Image (cartoon, helix red, strand yellow):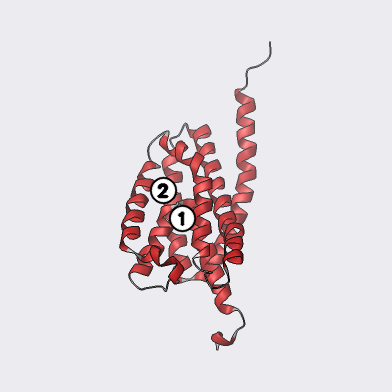
Amino acid sequence: MLENIPYLPYAISAFIGIGLAAATGFRVFLPMFAVSLASFMGWIPMHENFDWLAGLPILITTGIATVVEILAYYIPFVDHLLDTMSVPLATIAGSVMFASQFADIGTFPQWALALIAGGGTAAVISSGFAGTRAASTATTGGLGNSVVATTETAGAGIMSFLALAAPVIAFVATLLLLITVFVLGKKIWRRLRRTGKDNAPNPT
């Protein structure tokens, strides 16, 4: 019965792509590793243009990169260095994850949608959590950054799982995440501005 719904496969592909893009906003490599593992094990189909994601070399590479990325966020100063690169890297990874679900619609619309929906979603979430880390550093001296890092890793894992197992739920969760990022982003920006003003030297 569901097969008779017009454009349903495209909608499901969009939900999967956006869910995976949201996951890359938390961690760049974990969602790619999840997709590579799932396709390598035959749990999900993979279009021939993205067969490289299902290969053993990519599975091993993304697995190692995932472990290194997760651990690096617990190292002081390194986490801030990664934050400076996270948004562009997440944008690229989110675009690739989204495009991998739309390989049958033509190259231009495929990558146009990927950059807008996938890359845009990943960039917003990545920049939002980079701001959260900055606020954590300003208010806790960096002591709370490990909590932020753990939350991000958990978010990447949960969103990757939902995108592959429950795409509709992943899509709804992504919308809620985007709303949360916008709301918290405003609060964090105000707090940072207030902290900056409080720490500014008084004119004599």
**Quadrant of the rendered image containing residue 157:** bottom left
Image point (60%, 64%), residue name: 108
Residue 133 is situated, as x and y percent measured from the top left of the image, at: 50, 40
Q: Position of residue 25 (x, y in %)?
A: 51, 52
Q: Residue furthest top?
A: 204
Q: Where is mark 1, residue-wise?
A: 155
Residue farthest to the right? 204
Residue 175 visible in the displayed image: no
Quadrant in which the C terminus appears:
top right
Q: Image height check: is 5 above or below 111?
A: below
User: Which residue occupies 60% across, 23% down?
Assistant: 199
Q: Secondary structure at mark 2?
A: helix
Q: Is residue 24 above or below residue 7?
A: above
Where residue 158 sits: x, y (%)? 44, 60
The label number, if any, that marks residue 91 in the structure image = none
Q: Quadrant of residue 110?
A: bottom right
Disc 1 element: helix
Q: Position of residue 4 (x, y in %)?
A: 58, 87
User: Of 153 and 138, which appears nearest the observer?
Assistant: 153
Name of the residue lying farthest toward the bottom: 1
174 sits to left or right of 148: right
Amino acid type assigned to the residue bearing label 2 in the image: Thr
Q: Residue at x 38, y 47 (%)?
A: 70
Q: Is residue 44 left or right of residue 130?
A: left
In the picture of the structure, the residue carrying the numbered disc 2 is: 150
Report the quarter where the N terminus lies. bottom right
Residue 125 to residue 6: above or below: above
Distance from disc 2 to disc 1, alpha carbons, whole Å, reads: 8 Å
